[in-house]
Image (cartoon, helix red, strand yellow):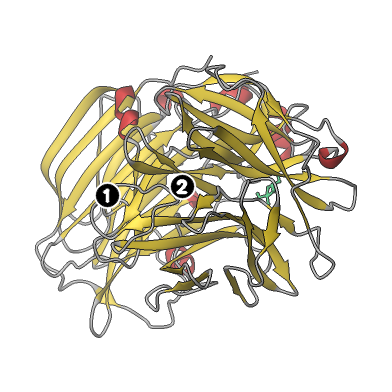
Amino acid sequence: SSVSKLHRTGYHFQPRRNWINDPNGPMYYNGVYHLFYQYNPKGAVWGNIVWGHAVSKDLINWKELEPALYPSKPFDKYGCWSGSATVLPGKGPIILYTGVIDKQSTEVQLYAIPENKSDPFLTKWIKPDAFNPIVVADHTMNASVFRDPTTAWWSKDGHWRMLIGGKRNNRGMAYLYRSKDFVKWIQAKHPIHSAPSTGMWECPDFYPVSLKGTNGLDLSMVGNNVKHVLKNSFDVTRFEYYTVGTYLKNKDKYIPDNTSEDGWGGLRYDYGNFYASKSFFDPSKNRRILWAWANESDSKEDDVKKGWAGIQSIPRTVWLDSGGRQLVQWPVQELNSLREKQVKISNQKLTKGHHIEVKGITAAQADVEVTFSFSSLNKAEPFDSRWVNPQDLCALKGSKVQGGLGPFGLLALASEKLEEFTPIFFRIFKAPHKHVVLMCSDARSSSLKRELYKPSFAGFVDVDLANNKKLSLRCLIDHSVVESFGAGGKTNILSRVYPTLAVKKKAHLFVFNNGTERITVENLKAWSMKSARRT
Ligand code: DQQ
């Protein structure tokens, strides 16, 4: 039906129909990228979970295969939940995943191997009975919050190690396990890390990042110029947090740096709709790639009507910022192969209250890169130290609230007369010793439809404007997706929106400024995006 098609994505991954959630076991093997995902083969709501499977040569165009893992054994009778893939040198890939064994949601950890390693798409997977389940919760643990094994890493002491997410009382836990042969696993005495009052840690991810340059590192890589990242998905709020820190190998401990707040209030990959993420190392291009699930923001009833729910983010290359305090992300370069018609704007002045249309592209399916500049910071409004939560601040100071330096940015998925639009913008404040940059993607004005979740997503951007009075923004617009990268990927926000007027050819794109300081659109490039091939 037409409702089902209006908001379907052109180039963000989604299967032909039905529900999806977490990305699972992403990997590169024998020249092929594999993406598995939590999938309900029977409908557009969560349930009957199997591992959907798609393969690609370029991370953009995907071929959907039959599910790779589905309940077939007593140990995964009630669901094949999230997990990861590890490519063992010389031996091929192994999947570690969580099986649900009963209606009480008792969770065990399982492994699966390809039936035929030389099948180019690894379509069939087997779950050997001999050692499965490979890990069960011991009597001190809560087996219904014990899941999502990570990719394993190998250490010179001859052991593989991996993490499993969990909770003790209300403490989030990343349990650590060791194995010599990948099938017999022993729990380490202590979790690699835990934090009080954070609730269940779902989908942990743990990996090294280089202190120099943007290259990714294989998991087993440890050395001097390396830090580690630990990310957890907090079941309670459905937000993810990560820290940058040190992995003390001898002690099997991970210690976050004192520049990384640990727990609520910590760093986030994305300040929007981005959950259960997972990264993998791509040896063919020496990069680490990050995927996440972006849930719908419409109602369950809408999803049933559409016949589908859930998409994957654009795969993002991820690396450590040169300051060493945070990560930076950028859409994989392969995405550029979908760029079609291009339009440009340069050196365009924007005085207060002005918006200018970016014409000539398919604004409902586009890629936009823009750099804004301004000549002074003097008009930045005073920052109130009580504004600790950027999302609240964005709700208070939305795009329509006039400011000093900002708000300025883009109006995406806008109807001609602006009855609907999703503004993605910056607003700059002056605190006693620094400037505070707010980046906002405000869904409140995104749709005339009422029964939608329309949050004013926002994050702060850690940039030094004193020497460089510029801010850049990239937006991937895809019918019901606005995926934004601020300041070269330092602060990112994925939002799901469902315009009723600003659809297909009736969608428009504008640049705007609503602050008294004049803003210059130094350089804007926007492209119509082709749809990804889906077979
Ligand atoms: N989704 C899976 C779990 C995981 C959760 C179930 C995170 O394994 O903890 O579909 O979204």
Q: Which amino acid lies under the numbered mark 1 shown in the image of this protein?
A: Thr
Q: Relative to residue 178, is residue 329 depicted above or below?
A: above
Query: Is 83 in front, or is 50?
Result: 83
- Image quadrant in which you'd find residue 191: bottom right
Check disc 1 and report the residue beneath it. Answer: 214
Q: Closer to the camera: disc 2 or disc 1?
A: 1
Q: Left of 192 or right of it: where is 387?
A: left
Residue at image x 68%, y 68%?
199
| Helix, strand or loop at mark 1 | loop
Q: Position of residue 516 (x, y in %)?
A: 20, 64
Q: Quadrant of the N terminus?
A: top right
- Per the image, the residue denoted by label 2 is 494
The spot of residue 424 in percent (x, y) is: 36, 50
Question: In the image, is residue 451 above or below residue 137?
Answer: above
Q: Position of residue 495 (x, y in %)?
A: 49, 46
Residue kind at label 2, given as amino acid type: Leu
Q: Residue at x 60, y 72 (%)?
A: 194
Q: CA distance from mark 2 to mark 1?
A: 22 Å
The furthest residue to the top: 535
Q: Could you tell whether 499 is left or right of 356 in the image?
A: right
The kind of secondary structure element at disc 2 is strand
Q: 485 or 429, which is in the foreground?
A: 485
Mark 1 Cα-neighbour bin, 10 Å: few <14, some 14–19, many ≥20: some
Residue at image coords 72%, 32%: 44
